[in-house]
Amino acid sequence: MIGLFGFQKSISYESSEFLIKKIVKTVIRNSHEQHSICVQEGFGVAHINLEFVKDDTQPVWNQEKTTAAFFIGEIFNRKDIITKYQLPVSESDQVSDTQIISLLFEKVGNSFAIDLNGPFLLLIWEKNKSKITIINDRLGLFPLYFAKVNHGVIFGTSIQGCLVDPEIPKEPDKTAIAEFLTFDHMLDQHTLVKAIKLLPQSSIMEIENNEVICRPYYKFEFLKHHPLKTDEAYIEEFIFYMRQAIKRQIDSKYPIGLLLSGGLDSRFLLAIMAENKEIDLNTFTWSIPGSDDSRYSLETSRKAHAQHHFFELKPDWLFDKAEKAILLTSGNGNIVNLHAFATLEEEANIANVIFKGFMGDAMFGFGIRPRFWADYDPDTMIEQHIEAYRDYRVLTIDPKDHQNYFTEPFFRETKDEWKEEFRTGMLACGCGQMTDHRSYFDLTQRVPRMTINGVDVVRDRAIVRLPFTDNDLVEFSLTIPPHLRYKRELMNRTFICNYPDYAKIPIAQTQLPMMHCARELWIRNKQFIQWHLRNRGLDKLAGPVSKPYKDYNKWFRTNLKHWVEETLLDSKTLNRGYLKPEEIKKIVTDHMAGKNNAVRIGALMSIELSHHLFLD
């Protein structure tokens, strides 16, 4: 697993060396990874990266050999940083990102963090002070977990690395599990292990004298008062920032690829990337053969003159790879959402750098609902936010059903905790608009706790680039008024305006083009005929309503049935104390009888496999 791992503890040099080597041995399980370590008495850091990444010698020491810098990730505004801080390097100098970080810290301390544009995790070791400074990017795109132990602190990019220290009690965090069973992700800093916490986004964490101080250096600020501005002006601004973001990230000394679905986010990236005729672009689609996503992504890729590669998402992929995916995501992800890992090895054999349409939904209105345009008392407002989750059917176990499913002790212990953290997360933006609450919550909770899992698994084999996370583009998204976020209005209109030929290709979700055209008319007439056929009982003649790219509903009762039953109906699973044993049995039995409990089964499987890997 790539990332940074380490500790500061009151132990001898020999014990320090033993501990860091043990961490490396635990988290490195692949021949395609490289590592370097730095050890001193009471201090150790391991830097792990992909083997093909050259010229990445770490740490980088200052001239006096008193300060060491470690870095994982990428800086996309290197030239601006060098100019702003007048660093003693020229464009022709072959300096690494880590060397730039070392120079910045020498010149201005840690105040440069807010200006870095890109996903990163960096660590500074000040030898004379015995002080560690760790900084992550604004969105926390490289997770860092940490735990306080006797006489010290241990940290790492995965909780697996932290658990190497035997002083960490292997006690589950029940609030985290309740949140996971509700929202399909944990909230705030919680992890599966109670003693281990997640470093918040845009944080500066200082470890000195075995104590931890953490403070934010940036906060997402939504506009409280929007200017009088035409929709066309927002469209012009949006496409400018989109193109700028991709221009900053497109250069690569390695082959590049794009994960292309049948949706809008990755298609938007493809359309812009295709404007650069000098790049040799690969596109990758994984799905069930013949799915709507596979057909529309192939058509889109051909229009962009990219080299398209299709990979079958096999029904039994989880049986072989679920545990590895859970290790890579520290148990934070539902296994039914981790299919980006299924065909990763084949994709990485073609491209070392993979682009994803990650976060486009969270930034531009995925969660916005009409119910937000009203005034409510504080308690009702939070209930309306939960209702919005019901609107999208993204609650794994609805809060109103908690008492039916949860054991009495588990329900009693968690019923107030998860809701208070949900409330705190929604109100943390400091705005009155409920649309801002939800957008802020998505950026600060859903993204770093759920959608990031699909990035973490791809990083096992490739450098991942995420144009939607560009600083300037994110800051622009904070200025968009609610009416242009609702139904992703601004994103849809900007795409149609600038790329009408791509917009005429249907989107998998609706199976319709994004704009009015002859093809839309033909498809709507076809759907109308199919509707009449189904009403007359002629389903086979009408054909399926849609052809999904995945079908865990079917796979859990066929190819993976034995695995699911063997895992979830085991006495150890049934008696964990979270869900009532009879309810677990009913979830499994009902699913095998035809009810779609795939998301719940995925969540329960994820929790149980995580217990096997981290706690048992």
Image (spheres, helix red, strand yellow):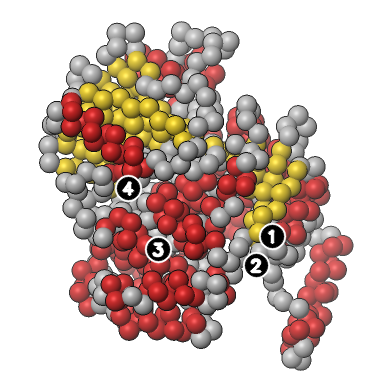
Residue type beneath disc 3:
Ser
* Residue 482 vertical position relative to residue 249 in the rendered view, above or below: below
Going 66% across and 40% down the picture, which residue do you hit?
Answer: 350
Could you say whether the residue bearing mark 3 is in a helix, strand or loop? helix
Q: Quadrant of residue 72?
A: top left
Going 47% across and 23% down the picture, which residue do you hit?
Answer: 56
CA neighbours of label 3 inside 10 A, class few (<14), some (14 to 19), many (20+): many
Quarter of the image with the N terminus in it: top left
Q: Are marks 2 and 4 in contact (CB under 8 Å)?
A: no
Residue named by callout 3: 606
Residue named by callout 2: 548
- Point out the frontmost of discs 2 and 4: 4
Q: What whole-number distance in Å separates the C-alpha atoms at marks 1 and 4?
A: 35 Å
Q: Position of residue 584 (x, y in %)?
A: 36, 78
In the figure, is residue 474 to the left or right of 503? left
Q: Which mark is residue 160?
A: 4
Q: Are marks 3 and 1 in contact (CB under 8 Å)?
A: no
Residue 459 visible in the current orientation: yes
- Point out the frontmost of discs 2 and 3: 3
Quarter of the image with the C terminus in it: bottom left
Residue named by callout 1: 293
Towards the viewer: 378 or 581 = 581
Q: What whole-number distance in Å separates the C-alpha atoms at marks 3 and 1?
A: 26 Å
